[in-house]
Image: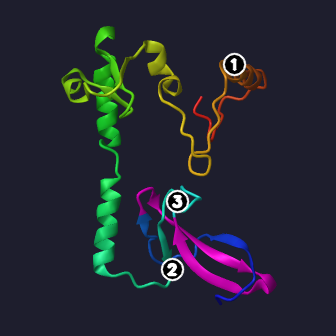
């Protein structure tokens, strides 16, 4: 089973009778080494978001018995890497932020966070920038692009390219488009 000439790794779908373990990025995926001659390799769980183990080192054999202590440690690590706020809290913060006067709207570049007035003092040693209405409508103009091509593959269209695509899609009659990895 382990000593096979590898052809690569295959994703295993819909064969799980138990929930997949989770890493800080969410539920993991089940993979299997593909071998020459159709032999089955050993199955393992790995991060669903990161293709490079340097970015997320989660690894667990499918048949591995994980100790209670390791499960607790994993849970603590996952919690420590969770966002500061829930989605609902971020939405409430955005609503508050948009109601502020223009001169009150500040963004912490280091924390990548829209600051409410009462939080500004805690971020005073950080690099702050004012936020315009245009930036709020186009967050990709405010946030720096993610640079890790293996974990954060994305393409930032120029305004000219985005307008060309939009005009072309409208001309062709499309009303819905799914853009994956294209924040603009």
Numbered circle sitting on residue 61: 2
Which residue is located at x 66 percent, y 83 percent?
41
Mark earlier in primary sequence (2, 3): 3
Q: Are marks 3 and 1 in contact (CB under 8 Å)?
A: no
User: Would you name the residue on which mark 3 appears?
Assistant: 54
Is residue 157 magenta-colored? Answer: no
Mark earlier in primary sequence (2, 1): 2
Q: CA distance from mark 2 to mark 3?
A: 18 Å
Front label number (3 vs 1) = 3
For mark 1, give the secondary structure.
Answer: helix
Q: Residues within 10 Å of mark 3 (few under 14, many from 20)?
A: few
- Above-or-below relation of 14 to 77: below
Q: Are marks 2 and 3 in contact (CB under 8 Å)?
A: no
Is 91 placed left or right of 29 in the picture?
A: left
Residue 37 screen position, x and y as percent = 81, 86
Is 116 placed left or right of 160 in the picture?
A: left
Q: Residues within 10 Å of mark 2 (few under 14, many from 20)?
A: some
Front label number (2 vs 3) = 3
Residue situated furthest front in the rendering:
125
Which stretch did the figure color magenta? 23-46
Which residue is located at x 54 percent, y 55 percent?
49
Is 38 placed left or right of 122 in the picture?
A: right
Residue 152 screen position, x and y as percent = 57, 45
Is residue 25 magenta-colored? Answer: yes
User: Would you name the residue on which mark 1 appears?
Assistant: 163
Q: How is the image coloured?
A: rainbow
Quarter location, residue 68: bottom left
Closest to the observer: 4 or 167?
4
Quarter location, residue 8: bottom right
Residue 156 screen position, x and y as percent = 63, 31
């Amino acid at each position: 089973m382990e000593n096979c000439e590898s052809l690569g790794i295959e994703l295993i779908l819909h064969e799980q009778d138990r929930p997949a373990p989770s890493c800080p990025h969410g539920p993991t995926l089940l993979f299997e080494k593909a071998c020459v001659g159709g032999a089955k390799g050993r199955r393992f769980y790995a991060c669903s978001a990161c293709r490079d183990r340097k970015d997320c080192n989660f690894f667990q054999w499918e048949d591995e018995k994980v100790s209670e202590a390791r499960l607790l440690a994993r849970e603590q690590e996952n919690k420590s890497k969770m966002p500061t706020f829930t989605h609902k809290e971020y939405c409430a913060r955005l609503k508050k932020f948009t109601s502020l006067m223009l001169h009150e709207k500040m963004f912490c570049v280091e924390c990548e966070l829209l600051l409410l007035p009462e939080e500004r003092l805690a971020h005073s040693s950080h690099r702050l920038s004012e936020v315009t209405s245009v930036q709020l409508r186009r967050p990709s103009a405010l946030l720096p692009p993610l640079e890790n091509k293996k974990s954060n593959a994305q393409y930032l269209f120029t305004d000219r390219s985005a307008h060309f695509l939009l005009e072309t899609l409208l001309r062709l009659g499309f009303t819905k488009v799914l853009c994956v990895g294209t924040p603009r």
